[in-house]
Amino acid sequence: MTGASPPEGGADPQQRRSSHVVRVLQVTVGLGLAVGMLWWGLPHFAKTSWSEVWHVLGTVPLWKAALFAGLVVGGLYCYTFVMTGAMQGLGHVRALILNVCGSSVSNLLPGGGAIGLAATYSIAKSWGFSAASVTTMAVVTGVWNVLARVALPIIAVVGLAWGATDLPPAMREAAWAAVLSGAAIVVLFALAIGTDRGARQLGRGLDRLVRLVRRGHGDSIERGLTDLRGRIAETVRTGWLQMSLGMLGFFGLYYVLFLLCTQTTGIELPFGQLFAAYAIGRLLTAVGVTPGGLGVTETGTAAALVAWGADPASAMAGVVLFSIFTHFLEIPLGALGWVAWSLMPRATSDELADADT
């Protein structure tokens, strides 16, 4: 059709095809790495075999499995306090739906965080929330997530040093990397909400992430961040305590789950070493080459447990058991979330128009 405007974002058909090819390759390589790390890397570095692991897992009673699932749901509910603290007007039920829908996508695909962000944006918009509100929540909760994950190894190192436990060089290096990363994130976030230039650059990066999975997406996040520096700063000022407590509850319940999983499979190590292994795993979930860090997370955690003296089969079984509930369980929970969203009322066209004015 003559006179048609180019797709938003300026991408021509050739660029879109290239982007799709890159995306397919990314997914293929990421899933291949995840399978390889789980099938070969995990038992290799844990110094055991899958047959031994399945034997240990077969001893887990059903009532414990139900308890573990309850802890996961409790942890996810705690996280709703992070989301409601970052988005005014969002209730806990809708926050839970947003969380599980986004997480289920992130746990299925390499680099799924971008698709999860797009899903969160679409669902929240369908409920009548403005692009400004969604953008603010995505930025603030993203920063809180990363800061929490880099804080865990620091806490672990302090605890191990206090207990006079020998620290592996890798753990010390991870802690230093966490300190530097956390400091860099704080500085970048302060610049983003403190200067127009910083806000533009952060928004441009988020737009690129969404554009990978949402054809025609333009620069709405960049424009929103530039316009909403004050709003983001106000959200941090008023919601930092609620968001921090929600994050504490989320990671706290998941640590309890980790302790119970390792206890169930027969691992006997001090709490400090178990927390250090847990911290390593939570930090490795940020590795985006596989879905939710799958394979990389389990291998790093199991290797740490074995290095501290845990039985190899028990260590790998405990890590796999923990992953079943924290990674794979979120997929069916996400499916339920999508069903719940499909049954919920949508905002009217007038409400959607009012939200973005």
Image: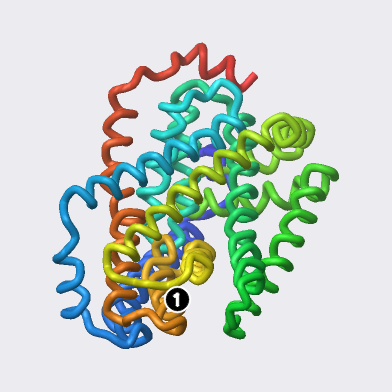
Residue 113 drawn at (x, y percent): 48, 53
Residue 278 drawn at (x, y percent): 47, 64
Q: Which residue is mark 1?
A: 300
Residue 28 left/right relative to 150: left
Residue type at mark 1 is Gly
Residue 227 in view in this figure: no
Residue 94 in view in this figure: yes
Of residues 235 and 196, the one drawn nearer to the viewer in this rendering: 235
The colour mode here is rainbow
Please name the residue shown 27% across and 63% down the image: 264
- Dot 1: element: helix
The quarter holding residue 86 reads top right
Residue 190 drawn at (x, y percent): 80, 48
Please name the residue shown 84% across and 43% down the image: 194
The answer to whether 310 is drawn above or below residue 320 in the figure is below
Residue 83 left/right relative to 35: right
Residue 55 drawn at (x, y percent): 15, 73
Of residues 55 and 226, the one drawn nearer to the viewer in this rendering: 55
Please name the residue shown 72% across and 57% down the image: 185
Q: Residue furthest top?
A: 350
Mark 1 nearby-residue class (10 Å; few <14, some 14–19, many ≥20): many
Image quadrant for the C terminus?
top right
